[in-house]
Image: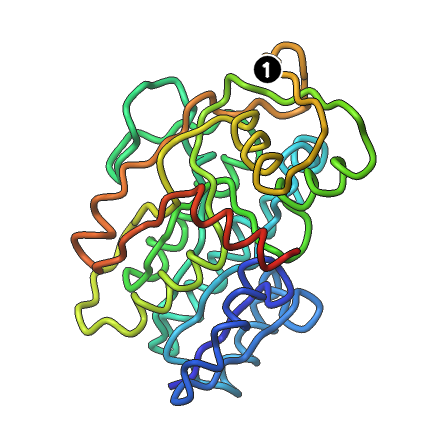
Amino acid sequence: MKIIVTGGNGQLGNCIRKISKTYPNIEFFFYSSSELDITNKLNVEEVFRQIQPKYCINAAAYTAVDQAEKEPEKAMAINEIGVGNLASVCKHFGTVLIHISTDYVFDGNTNIPYDENAVTAPIGVYGKSKLLGEQLATKENPETIIIRTSWLYSEFNKNFVNTMLNLFQQKEELNIVNDQFGQPTNANNLAEAIMTIIMSNNKKYGVFHFSNFPETTWYQFAEKIKEITNSKIILNPITTDQYPTPAKRPFRSTFNLEKIQNVYGVVPENWTESLEKCLKHIQ
């Protein structure tokens, strides 16, 4: 079996690369954006013609949430048009597309965890571009599995955990937002969930939610990183209003995780346990 992974140098791409050696019967092809430009349909067709993959994991995305407000065309090109290109080419070659999306497709104005049928209402360019990508993918190719995830981190690349670890070394005190709720997700866990889906004989297409659990805030997330690493930094909880950003964030974008468990037997891990494993890896 052959699998193409776009965004091969990103967090998720690196996590899939890490576990790929445990699947000796699968040939993985990892592509960076410079090697496979998903906004260029001819480039996508050329690569697929060469590889003839059974699966394509789309981990390529424009993820700079604040920057997206300044360059919406670029965000839409990658997160909408690029995804549509992949879905269309996947359909042509009989490839199953596994596309990674986000909790930012929701507005966050709820106290109930979002299930896969919840009404989407993104409040920023990034979320809008990801939602349009989801819609285009399912329109172009019904054999698409969309996995929405949230607050992704790992030992690789730039993310909240690595940013905190760097700031803990540089600062004596930090202000962290404590009124936005979500679920941190170790990208290594997401990589394992994707491979469980691929190895399953029971293929169900459509949207699935995957993250670690339960919900927390950015401040509590930072506090846990501080506790595990025995940092002496002082962390101060602040409100979103005290930390204005170009893009609005959902206040509570918590997922209901039942569907992926029921359909694929993927059991999410507690985020604090998963964080401990990741930090051991980093240290």
Residue at (35, 60) in percent of width and height:
193
Residue at (30, 49) in percent of width and height:
208
Q: Position of residue 89 (x, y in %)?
A: 44, 70
Q: Amino acid at mark 1?
A: Thr
**Residue where numbered disc 1 is placed:** 240
Q: Is residue 11 left or right of residue 35?
A: left
- Whether residue 132 is visible here, answered yes or no, is no
Residue at (37, 52) in percent of width and height:
147
Question: How many other residues sit within 10 Å of disc 1, few (<14), some (14-19) or many (≥20)?
Answer: some
Please state, as top left, top right, bottom left or bottom right, where the C terminus lies in the image.
bottom right
Q: Secondary structure at mark 1?
A: helix
How many marks overall? Answer: 1
Q: Is residue 62 left or right of residue 185?
A: right
Please state, as top left, top right, bottom left or bottom right, where the N terminus lies in the image.
bottom left
Q: Is residue 138 above or below residue 70?
A: below
Residue at (39, 46) in percent of width and height:
148
Q: Position of residue 17 (x, y in %)?
A: 54, 73
Q: Position of residue 179 (x, y in %)?
A: 51, 17
Q: Is residue 216 above or below residue 159?
A: above
Q: How was the colour assigned to the protein in this rendering?
A: rainbow
In the image, 60 versus 163, the foreground residue is: 163
Q: Residue furthest right?
A: 170
